[in-house]
Amino acid sequence: MVALQIREARKSFGSTCALAGLSLALDGGEMLGLLGPNGAGKTTLIRAIAGRVRLDGGSVALFGQVLATGQRRPALGVVPQENALYPLLTARENLEAFGRMNGLTGKRLRERASWALEWTGLAERAKSPVREFSGGMKRRLNLACGVLHEPKLVLLDEPTVAVDPQSRELIYDMLGALRATGTALLLTTHYLEEAEARCERIVIVDHGHAIASGTLSELVRQAGLSGRRVRLSLDRAVSRAPEGFTLENAGAALSATISDVAGELPGLLARLTALGLGVRDLEVRSASLQTVFLALTGKELRE
Amino acid sequence: MIGMLIANSWKQLRRDRGAQVLAFVVPIAFFSIFAVIFGPKGNSVTGTSRVVVAVADESVTERSRALIAALQADSSLRVLTHTRGQKPRVPAPFTRAIVEDMVKTGDVSVALVLPAGIDTSIMSFTADRARALVLYDPSDPVASRVVGGLLQRAALRSTGLLGRSVPDTAEAGAASGDDGEAESLLLPLRIESRALLGTKRDNPMVAFYAAGVAVMFIMFSAASAGGVLIEETESGTLERVLTTGLGMGKLLVAKWLYITSLGVLQITVMFTWGMLVFHLPLLEHLAGFAIMTVCTASAAAAFGLVLATLSRTRQQLSGLANLLVLSLNAIGGSMFPRFLMSESLQKFSLVGFNAWALDGYLKVFWREQPLASLVPQVAMLLGFSALFLVLARQLARRWEAV
């Protein structure tokens, strides 16, 4: 079943267009990466899904039901980028507070809070005030507060920002466990390698549009980066790149793009040998999400 | 290096509007408020306002009328002699009971009773001569002395024995003395001064000033507690709470009830301390205290929410709270009694809920009025609460879906 369906979402703030007819869909149990440069419209989209932004046009539907702004969304969990917790309350008190706000009560609330403490590895710190927690512990608790009420769709806004690699791994293990229960996850992140590794599909947003979507290989094709990138470290620096090559590392390396590794690579090496250039090392890579992202959104800085 | 650090500080101040308000607008506001209160417009011996005195003439003789006329002619007094013509419809001369009640309820801070026989007692110097009675509220230490002094001067002049060489107001006031009888063979009139309030206590003025301190404190406290809204905005907690579907209305009501209960607890702790250490008669006035504390805390909590919803940052809230709370308390009577202010300023001060709160507490602890007398204060404080809550709700729309 389609967990989330956004059709032609439009939103402007004054003269600034944040969403310009953006559409996307997310299936149940799927993990979708939502990428885009700063100011691309990701936050506005997330807030619109959460009912915190009133769209000028278009619609947001959760599990087939089109929702109005402000309408309760019990099937939705939101994990904000900030550690939006009460620092003077304990871990359990935070969980119970947000659980109650999301409709849990009584025994069920206590059970879910206990589950969350185990799930986050914070059971032993259940009675400690959150202000005493490390960044990673707060991140895990932040995540747990958003999923305590067992939503079927969770919005994750930079869930691993500013945490160490160990905590990051643990958080993705936790997200994997959620997916295993059929929960759909919409992840926004600037860690492209994480999106590449963890998400089944990726949507790249820019200027309020979804400019590309699909698996990584589909994105690579959409970006026109189907070939392999060959990088050759030279035994001496050159001042000019031979035809078909690009200078790298101040002339100490050359790069080129080929579509048929077995057929074209021997010819490349032969041309360099003929030019009297020795090759010390060689690397062949397909296009990364980073490459695709920059190819689609450009290298210009966004504020 | 030091020069660079100083320059940095000035640059930051130039770009911080909140700090500029604190640095420059607050002092100007305070200077203006104090200048209005103590400025020359009051036209009185205190430099602030005329002393209002209610006079009951039981003698009703030519001499007593002459004494009253002499007092009426003095620019530092405003003399009231008759009811306002509402109850009963025809203005009636004040009686001793009426003027006594006026002092007790705070309508005036001093009253004068000219008893029968006062006309013949002037310059008689006999032991049993009639005595003029000055009834006063000891929270105003000036009024009774001024009236006593001016009465002696009027008596001297009425005899015609002395021309213009009479004591001036200050000297004559000193001659009237404190509680009890001002007896001197040199004085033409025998005057008895009697405090009508705060007479049963060891430390009567504590009851008077506890109210002022409590009201000012609770306003600062409520403004600070309301700032939690701003902290929750900055931490993202508010956004998260609102995504759960909990409405802004419920959120504000919850905050208001919390700040109100906190305020009730704080004032209770303060007054309990006052009772234990400074003999504040809390237990004698528990019901009135409870009513006034709940109503005051309610209005202060809603006021704090208005400030919080009006401010974008903690710094802004701090500047706004300092400016408004100190200003309202300066004119509302918490810092010094309102009777020191001009009548127009006294009326103007009622635009602040704190003046009503203070009046209510004073009715309970100082004037020892019955609970029914608190109806106007309770009604106004609840009205202010409702008004502030509506205002805060409107201002909080900026946090709702955009």
Image (cartoon, coloured by chain):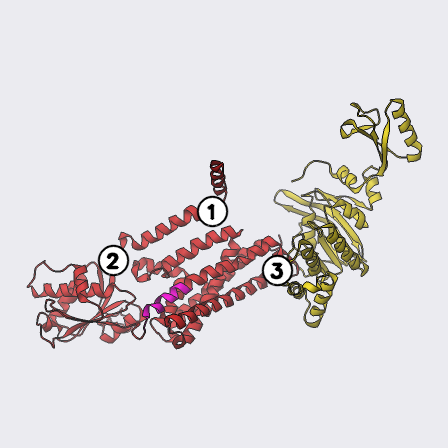
Chain colours: A yellow, B red
Question: Residue B205 lies in magenta, yes or no?
Answer: yes
Residue at the left extreme? B161
Q: The residue under label 2 is which amino acid type?
A: Thr
Given the image, what chain letter belongs to the residue carrying mark 3? A
* Quadrant containing the C terminus of chain A in the rendered view: top right
Kindly state the secondary structure of the residue where label 3 is placed.
loop
* Left or right: residue A13 compared with residue B211: right
* Distance of label 1 from label 2 (alpha carbons): 36 Å
Q: Which residue is mark 2?
A: B46
For the residues bearing labels 1 and 2, Cβ distance under 8 angstroms: no
Who's the residue at 72% across and 63% down the image?
A116
- Name the foreground residue: B396 vs B226: B226
Question: Residue B96 lies in magenta, yes or no?
Answer: no
Given the image, what chain letter belongs to the residue carrying mark 1? B
Give the percent coordinates (x, y) of residue B65.
Answer: 14, 68
* Quadrant containing the N terminus of chain A in the rendered view: bottom right
Q: The residue under label 1 is which amino acid type?
A: Ala
